[in-house]
Image (cartoon, helix red, strand yellow):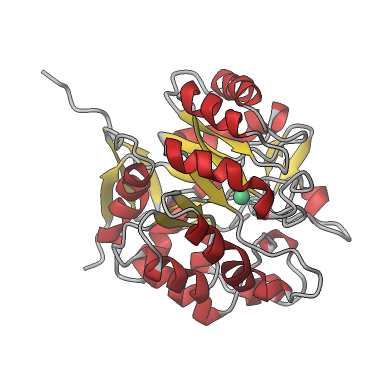
Amino acid sequence: MNPDSITIGRPDDWHLHLRDGAALRAVLPHTAERFARAIVMPNLKPPVTTTVLAGEYRQRILDARPDGSDFEPLMTLYLTDRTPPAEVERARASGFVHGFKLYPAGATTHSDAGVTDVRHIDPVLARMAELGVVLQVHGEVTEESVDVFDREARFIDDVLAPLAARHPALRIVFEHITTRAAVDFVRSARDGIAATLTPQHLLHNRNAMFAGGIRPHFYCLPVLKTEPDRAALLEAATSGDPRFFLGTDSAPHARHTKENSCGCAGMYSAHAGLELYAEAFDAAGALDRLDGFAHRFGADFYRLPRNAGTVTLWRRPTAVPASFVFGDAELVPMRAGGQLAWTLRRDPMPATR
Ligand code: NCD
Ligand code: ZN
């Protein structure tokens, strides 16, 4: 019933922040050790808004890979009010851009250059639908008057449902969903709508942010929600429904920018990017569903080949350091100073002859 090891197809991370420069070099080995590919978020400063910028960023990621790594970055472009439809053609032709990311302006870290009204990008979305380019959505309204915990649910009604109806052929990933409302929306949506799920939203509810005091390392956006929301997310992730797949949203920030009177949003999970999901799936008695969630469903949605090779997780505790070196700062990871229940090993490729 509770196996001591599980082998799955080599996984991908369908939502990841890698940053740039020294930060990139610090975090990339964690992802490259676990995942064959990752959808790389474009919210750099300044943002990755063009295919040319994405090509340059991609090269910096390739250059930062550990020796011998075959990790493949899948690039995304950052939509602004002024993204021209011709950029969609350039992106499609590049072969390395796999989507455009919609950040409502002001919704999250480095989103100030984002879209102020989705109506402004309707011509771009129409071109994306024609060319089969995926839209990735940060699904929160930004109005001050809307309660922080209601911003995802409001976004579904006010923005996402109408957008999906205006562009019936557009393929959309509702990123890092956090609520039962989002699960219900995806389940009842038309074809071509999927969602990614993070480890923190499967493992924790909002109490984690306030356990004995304020816990800045549990602050991310969209913010952790209620226990019924967490239960709905875990049920969706472990249901075998191909519309729900893995996206860590690992989002590194230097310790001093999180342990601050105005701390940054983002949790770092790349060091345990598969192991934490194994804990969640194990707790749900659904380890047999992890292969679909981590290896097959995302690749199928993005119309990319599934990875060859496998990885094995062993039920053996691994200690998590209190922090990692992060350029000239420190990075506090999820489960800092604690233990992971599973240890990962990449399996040797079988000989072909
Ligand atoms: C992300 C970041 O730090 O770039 N932060 C986060 O809390 N998830 C941005 C994002 O995905 O919202
Ligand atoms: Zn993110």
Residue positioned most to the bottom: 228
> Residue 205 at what x, y percent from top left?
58, 74
Q: Nearer the viewer, residue 64 or 236?
A: 236
Of residues 259 and 248, the one nearer the viewer is 248
Counting from the top left corner in percent of width and height, residue 124 is at 59, 41
Image coordinates of residue 28 in percent, x first then y, are 57, 33
Residue at 79 percent of width and 48 percent of height: 112
In the picture, the quarter occupied by the C terminus is top left
- In front of the other: 6 or 220: 220
**273 left or right of 223?**
left
For the N terminus, the image quarter is bottom left
- Residue sitting at 77 percent across and 55 percent down? 106
Q: Is residue 271 visible?
A: no
Answer yes or no: is residue 279 visible: yes
Residue 87 vertical placement versus 246 (above, below): above
Total count of labels: 0
Give the side of residue 293 with respect to residue 45, left or right: left
Q: Residue furthest left?
A: 353
Q: Residue at x 39, y 70 (%)?
A: 188
Please identify the quarter of the rendering in which residue 113 is found.
top right
Estimate the x, y position of residue 201 in percent, counting from the top left.
54, 65
Is 330 drawn above or below residue 184 in the view shown?
above
Vertical comparison of 147 with 236: above or below: below
